[in-house]
Image: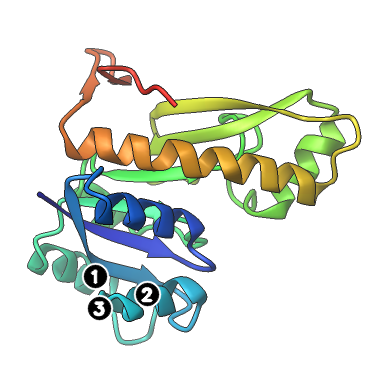
Amino acid sequence: MKQLAVFVSGRGSNFRTVHKGIQAGEIPATVTLVVSDKPQCPAADYARGHGIEVVHYPSPDITPDNLKHHLKDRDIDLILLAGYLKMVPAEVVQSFPRAILNIHPALLPAFGGKGYYGHRVHEEVIASGAKVSGVSIHFVDEEYDHGPIVAQLVVPVHHDDTPDSLAERVLSFEHQLYPKVVGALCRGEIYWRDDGVPYIDPPIVL
């Protein structure tokens, strides 16, 4: 049974979807800790409502090294980013190699990087004239939206889409894919090629 920490900043809909998968017995894990830069956000409230410890980071009282040790003291195996809008400290990234996942609402490497989050991503996709967008799940490194991609789904962009309508469509696919990838990681079904590219076996079927 893997011990998870989830980093959140807002509603935490992907966190909730993963947590429901755990409750349903579909993901062999427990959410032990939630880390948030906004400790009163709905995702943090949801965590507290389910008896999950919430830590405020970044905060004046916790250094990156403190956060790293707090995660280690809680025997955290894996970290999930679920709408977390801050950079994960390098100390944490280096202490959890190949053990931090992020989900991004576009097909990386396009429409990713610093500043590309939330509605801005969908605004830029529509403005570009792209006919498809999607969902990307990747391992986290020291750069925004940069680590090795483990899973992607293509989502069509309609001619009359607004950022809101595209965001809603993409989010529905996020909710399908993220729990599946988290489950695969917890079950040891993610492997690495010699060139550092991850893959899932058996492949995910939605």
Residue furthest bottom as drawn: 61
Q: Which residue is mark 3?
A: 51
Q: Are marks 3 and 2 in contact (CB under 8 Å)?
A: no
Q: Are marks 1 and 2 in contact (CB under 8 Å)?
A: yes
Task: Please state which amino acid type lies under the numbered disc 3.
Answer: Gly
How far, Cα to Cα, is label 1 from label 2? Answer: 8 Å
Q: Is residue 141 left or right of residue 174?
A: left
What residue is shown at x 73% (from left), y 51% (from top)? 120
Task: Please state which amino acid type lies under the numbered disc 1.
Answer: Leu
Q: Which residue is mark 2?
A: 57
Residue 48 drawn at (x, y percent): 33, 80
Quadrant location of the C terminus in the rendered image: top left
In the image shown, does 53 or 68 lie closer to the viewer?
53
Determine whether 52 is above or below 102 in the image. Answer: below
- Check disc 3: other Cα within 10 Å, few if <14, some if 14-19, many if 20+: few
Residue 13 drawn at (x, y percent): 50, 58
